Image (tube, grey):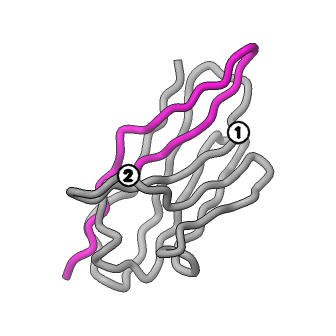
Amino acid sequence: QVQLVESGGGLVQPGGSLRLSCAASGSFWRIDTMGWYRQAPGKQRELVAAITSGGTTTYADSVKGRFTISRDNARNTVYLQMNSLKPEDTAVYYCNGDFRDSGWLRNYWGQGTQVTVSS
């Protein structure tokens, strides 16, 4: 069983910063791609950023230049540094990862953390 636990969400004013963390635990051999998604009320869940085990990153156009994804493979943790936050960044942010063990590859989601950008 694998668990992803997010932390770091909260309320921030426009232009502010937040850092999200997501720690993976459980039984697995390795983690391939990890990512952050978000879902705003009434909208579909969308990819925000992703990072491969080798460190290659992908970003949604709406966050390029403002958000940075990183990971600590030794700690099985992925981070999302969010700067210059805008009200349209308000959403529940979910961590996601592709986990490998002997004979299987499975995708897991965290429970989500709320990010609210408002004055």
Q: Where is residue 47 in the image (x, y as percent from the top left)?
A: 49, 56
Viewer-nearest of discs 1 and 2: 2
Which quadrant, please, contains the C terminus?
bottom left
Residue assigned mark 1? 32
At 64% from the left and 59% from the top, the residue drawn is 70
Would you place residue 3 above or below residue 8 in this image? above
- Label 2 neighbour load within 10 Å: few <14, some 14-19, many 20+: some
Q: Is mark 1 on a helix, strand or loop?
A: strand
Question: Residue 94: within the magenta?
Answer: yes
Which portion, as a residue range, is magenta? Answer: 93-119
* In the foreground, 73 or 46: 46
Q: What element carries label 2?
A: loop
Residue most extreme to the right:
54
Residue assigned mark 2? 45
Q: In the drawing, does residue 98 fall left or right of residue 7? A: right
At 38% from the left and 78% from the top, the residue drawn is 85
Would you place residue 85 above or below residue 95 in this image? below
Quarter of the figure with residue 6: top left
Task: Name the dominant secondary structure of the magenta segment.
Answer: strand
At 48% from the left and 46% from the top, the residue drawn is 95
* In the foreground, 76 or 106: 106
Q: Where is residue 25 in the image (x, y as percent from the top left)?
A: 56, 29
Q: Identity of the amino acid at label 2?
A: Arg
- Label 1 neighbour load within 10 Å: few <14, some 14-19, many 20+: some
Q: In the drawing, does residue 109 fall left or right of residue 111? A: right
